[in-house]
Amino acid sequence: MLFGLDGVEIGLIITFACLFGAIMSGYPVAFSIGGAGIIAFGILAALSDAGILLHQAVDDRSAEYAQLVADGVARDTISLFRYPDLPTYTQELFPDGWQRAFDRNIALITNRMNERVFAGPSIETLLAVAMFVLMGITLERSRIANDLLTTMARVFGPLPGGLAVSIVVVGAFLAASTGIVGATVVTMGLLALPTMLRNGYSPELSTGVIAASGTLGQIIPPSIVIVLLGTLAGDLYSTAQEEFAQANMCPDALTYLGEPAVLSVGTLFQAALLPGIFLAFLYGAYAFGFAMVYPEKAPPVAGSQGDVQIVGRYHNVTWFVGAPVAIILFAIGLSTAGLSGSQNVSVSSIADLGAQAELRTNVSAECQASMIERHGQEKWDRAVLQQADIDANGGTLTQEQRELSPEALAEAEAQALANAPLLSSTLMLVWVLAGIALAMSVGVAPRLPMLPILIGAGAIGVGIVLDAAFIGPLTTPGTAFLILAIPFAALLYSIREAAGRLGQNDLLRVVFPPLVLIVAVLGSILGGITNPTPAAALGAAGALLLAAYRKLEEDPDRSPAPIIWGTLSIILMLVLGTTFDLRISIEQVSVENYIAFVIALICYSVSMLTLVYCCWILWSKGVLTPVVRETAKVTSMVFAILIGSQLLNLVLISFGGEHYIQDFLKSFDSEFKVFLMVMLVLFILGFVLDFLEIIYIVIPIVGPVIYGGTLDPKWVTIMIAVNLQTSFLTPPFGFALFYLRGVAPASVTTGHIYRGVIPFVLIQVVGLGLLWMFPSIVTIVPDLLSN
């Protein structure tokens, strides 16, 4: 063996040396990765043909190997790392010749491109990348960051370290609305860095907080990193768990886990929400603490007079905190008491399957032992008792037994009607949102006449009474609309007046439009209403509307009214779609549903024309062309890296490098120890590699091991995502540092940037440690939403 190293080990060294050399060469990364794979394969093929690279393989025909299998050791865990005394035999690095490996790689790369890039099941999710990129670049071009920075500086500036805290808040906000690190860092570097330096902030704190806050877009949803990582992790998790279940003598992952082995991007968005906010809190806490310790390096900045009219000592607390909280608590109380909730009383003519045990118990003894080790004896015993009770009552219902008789169906419908809540949860949501808007409008302008606000409050009260008295589960949407027509008209008049008053507040005027867009996109994903791809399309359309509206506001010769009408059309279309049955292809269509369909069709036409009009406005203002160009460049880079990384991975597979690394990881008994090693490797690689290279090159290698055990896949993926976020900050090749260096003034040196970012890298490490110690920070939101 050359230098005492196994041929596979030398192959790994050569492959990664070619990768790092290609990346350092200055060529585009997307092409460097694929080129590194081709060059590495050529070198390895030449060395293998020369007989220089030899591999010591385990002799699977030996008696020692057969004994291990007979003792119950899984074949995929047998390796020289765990059993170094096993007999071996020497073979060439490419046992069948490099020509055969080359032919196999060509076939595999074609299949992988078809599965993962062109027509595979994950392509729909990957489409969300392009639309999230379009959404982010459009919002960045609409000067949202400029307005947010100016407003937040006025709010937090008078506090110690207030400008730094405002940068963190704006960074978190931009992360949820744009999710693009480069655009966020460059924008905040251009707008905020000169202001911070001019007000006496130290260059280290200024550059560190801007670079770190800009990277929050990598973890706060909607994050492109989570979309890409989640798409890959979902495939790795399902495949690894199927293999893990069969290795534990169970027929499939559903039997072994007690639940489907599914990991969706939407679930990962839910899991990433709290960690992202938590990291932003740590950044802000550090900035505030730094200002308390070194006040001369982060002094408070006197702000201008606010635009909220304060008429009493507790004015802000009453109308901006007390009243909204009271309204929300009132709605929660009605829901808890069973007076408000879903009034859906539809009953299927097919009964449920009947009671089912939480675990399948009709399994082999080997599978039973594995399931007890996974879930615990208590859960297994409980499942056995559940199954025994089900069998005693006749077992699981057959298809014939599940069909309800007319009498049973009528009884089920009557019972559902009797148990229906008094108030509709949908209408309650309308009353709550309207009430909060009215309360906050009083807080903004308390000296204006109260009559319009009182009319709205009265309309809400009358609407609740009418809902309780005349609207029930069997009331059609058209009838309910007629009953509430007068309260709705009065409420719309009041809301229009309240919107005008709220618009007088700079903070609300700046934050509200993008906040609505964020809530619409994230709410539809986190609430399980849709998957990330339609939500991304909604976000892209909303970003175009918002950007065009801002451009029309700057043009005195044009009115933004068409944008408003188009937005209202989209809102009305969504309301009609969730309230009425718009299926006109069924046999019986009621008049009100047909009318609703026609109105929805008109709204759709108006909204599409509005989007075309927005695109024309942005194109005429010189905004659309660079937005589309940047979107195409970023999306093309992502897919080019995906293709190149697949080629590099196939080179690793061709000489057994991938399995060699996996065998090494499987040789450790502790899953946490293995995952800790992987996290350390990812952290170190973050110093020299971008997150895309790590996702598509490293994760497919280690994924079958870290996703094939008992660790929660949501926690594993978010831990990796937070670790990858650190790669933007770690010198010397952190991308956020390069972005900031490009726009920083000459007085700010590279040393300032490196020294400033080190505390935030340590905060990232502390954050990872806290997520490791308290995994519920990751899992609590998905668990609550799933229940």
Image (cartoon, grey):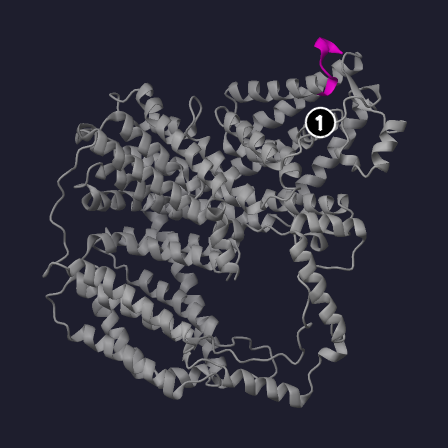
Q: State whether residue 488 is above or below residue 786.
A: below
- Left-right relation of 380 to 465: right
**Quadrant in which residue 725 is drawn:** top left
Residue 4 colored in magenta in the image: yes
Q: Main secondary structure of the magenta part?
A: helix
Q: Quadrant of the N terminus?
A: top right
Graded by Cα atoms within 10 Å as few (under 14), some (14 to 19) or many (20 or more), the crowding at tag 1 reads: many
Vertical position of residue 590 compared to residue 555: above or below: below
Front residue (pair 191, 620): 191
Image position, residue 763 (x, y; %)? 39, 33
The answer to whether 272 is drawn above or below residue 658 in the figure is: below
Label 1 is placed on what type of residue? Tyr
Q: Callout 1: helix, strand or loop?
A: helix
The foreground one among 378 and 510 is: 378
- Residue 627 position within the rendered picture, expressed as x and y whole percent measured from the top left: 40, 43
Asked if residue 350 can be seen in this view, the reply is yes
Q: How many marks?
A: 1
Residue 308, image x, y percentages: 15, 56
Residue 52 lies in the magenta-colored region = no
Q: Residue at x 55, y 75 (%)?
A: 583
| Above or below, comparing residue 137 to residue 267 in the picture | above
- Magenta residues span 1-8
Q: Determine whether, in the image, residue 764 is placed left or right of residue 638.
A: left
Residue 158, image x, y percentages: 16, 41
Give the residue pinned by disc 1. 660
Q: Name which quarter of the figure residue 711 lies in.
A: top right
